[in-house]
Structures are given as C-alpha cells and as structure tokens.
Amino acid sequence: MMTYLLLALGLVLLIAGGELLVRGAVRIAEHLGLSPMLIGLTIVGMGTSMPELAASVQAALAGSPGIALGNIVGSNIANLLLILGLAVALSPFAVPRGVLWRDGGTGLVCAAILIAAGYTLGLTRGVGILLVVGMFAYVYLAFRQEKAGAGHGAAYDKALALEEIDPALVPSAKPKGSIVLAAASLLAGIALIVWGGSLLVDAAITIAASLGVSDEVIGLTVVAVGTSLPELVTSAIAAIKRQGEIALGNVLGSNIYNVLFIGGVTGIVAPTEIPAGILQTDLLVLLAVSAIVMLFAFTGGRLSRVEGSLLVAGYAGYVAVTAGLI
C-alpha cells in the first residue's frame, strides 16, 4: 500500500512542480521581454510536458527503458483514445481540415520516426538531437503561422488549453510580479519535478516487480495515464466549454511534444534501446490509432459521440490486453 501511495505522491509532485515551473518561467520570460505568443508556444507548451519528461528521463537513467518509452508511447495512446474520446463524448465537435492534416499528420510522422529509430539505431544521442531539432522546427513554424494569422495549430491550442483553466499562466506584454519570486517558483518547480519523478519511477519499478509484470506494462498504463492527467483535465474543460478545436489541438500537440521533446531529451540525457515489445506492438497501435482518429475526423469533418465512445472502449480494450487481463 505504501508503494502505491508513493506513486500517487510522485504524480502529485510532478504535476504541482510542472505548474510552478511554468508560472515562474512565464514571469521570467516577461521580464526578459519575450513576446506573449512566443512564451505560449515554447514555455507554456513545453512546460506542461514536464511531468512526462521527468518520468521518462529518470526511468532511462535508472535503467528502465520500459517505463521511459512506455510513458511516451502509452501517454500518446491514452491521449488519442481515452482523453480525446472522453472530450468528444462530452461535446462532439467539427474538425478543421487544416488542423487534421497538419497536426494529425505530424503525429503520424512522429510515431513512424520512433519505429524507424527502434529498428535501426535505437534512441541514441544522435536520434535525440534530431528529435529536439525537429521540435524547435515545429515550434518555429507554428510561431510563423500564428504571426502571419494563418490559423491556430496544435502547439498554440496546447498552451491555450492550460491557460484557459489557469489565468496565471497567460503571458503578458507587461511584466507581472517580482523576478525574484518568479525565479523562486521556477527553482521550486524543478525541485518538485525531480523529487516527484524519482518517487514515481522507484514506485513503478517496485510495483512491477511485486505484480510480476514488466516495467513496460506499468509504463504504458499506470505511469502514462498518471502523467497525462493535466491533458485529461484541460481537454475535458475545453470540450465542456464547446471549444472542441482546442481539445483536439491539446491532444495532438501533446503527442507531438511527447515524441520530439520528451523522446529527444531522453535520448540525449540517457540513450536507451526501444524495448522490443513496445516496438513491435505498442508503437504500431499508436500508428494505427493516429490513423483511425484522422479517419473518424475526416469522414463528415467532425468527431461524434459514437466515435468518442468507440475511442474510450478501444482504450479499455488496449489496457486489458496490455495488462494481460484478456
């Protein structure tokens, strides 16, 4: 029981630390004179992925690639099936074709890149650097697109989804608060993230051993869902507010950040192999699910309650098979 409490505590510390880190970083960026749009696309967008980043990096450093990669792949599958499915079930919405092809297609490419890396080099430092470069290229293109008024992308919607529920994260052209307090918030956030990530990974490894299952199973299910809780909350609130495009963009943006940013940093800090089980099964599931979501959205140009329910049912089936329940 204590191990499960430590796991829960680790998740709470990760989420709270991520919140403090983003708040502090946003205020510091304001004092440095960065534009609100750039702050939203970079600091807010990447900062909300810190729980997943801490869990994956610390798991890789601890010699548990199943948790490190399982967290990334499992989070993406949960985003598409569970979180998007629940959001659509709450409030069906139309899907702009531009968002669908640009951001949904980018998510498909990201999954394919991980598969290609798994069958060739693994998640090496070189691959990690390429992924991070791809992340910055994606953010740069998103910034150019927003600046040109060419429509919102997933990176923008990911930041906006969090800002909708926490006004303190909304960047301002005029600096707010003390830069000293902002720095303290940033440092406190980093400390909580490191502590929470350590607790989470240690507890997950212990739970896997006690249940007689692999690290991959825990990473793909418990850790993945736990670190995806912020996306669940923000997407559900966006759906309830009838802001379906933001809910979809939040999910697609998170999946792109997970592979390019989290996968890239993990490869740079702690190069690791992609476990065979994840490579041969779960990454293919992710690729298929990404294509199915695009197909659902393409047919009729919207996501319906029936399709949302099918996505949630699909996630229940995936977890059951992964955990060996069926």
Image (cartoon, rainbow, N blue to C red):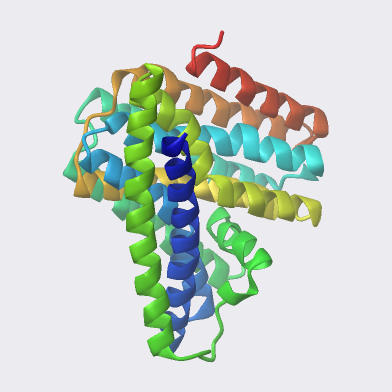
* Rendering coords of residue 157 (x, y %): 61, 58
Q: Horizontally, is 304 left or right of 235 in the view?
A: right
Residue 183 seen in the figure:
yes
Q: Quarter of the image for the C terminus: give it.
A: top right
* Rendering coords of residue 17 (x, y %): 44, 62
Q: Which of the 4 image quarters holds residue 273?
A: top left
* Rendering coords of residue 77 (x, y %): 53, 32
* Rendering coords of residue 193 (x, y %): 38, 58
Q: Horizontally, is 7 left or right of 229 in the view?
A: left
* 18 is higher (above) or lower (below) than 268: below
* 15 is higher (above) or lower (below) than 122: below
Q: Horizontally, is 126 left or right of 287 in the view?
A: left
Q: Which of the 4 image quarters holds residue 190?
A: bottom left
Residue that lies at the very extreme toward the top in this rendered image: 326
Comparing 162 with 208, the one in front is 208
Q: Residue at x 44, y 23 (%)?
A: 282
Residue that lies at the very extreme toward the front in this rendered image: 2
Comparing 202 with 317, the one in front is 202
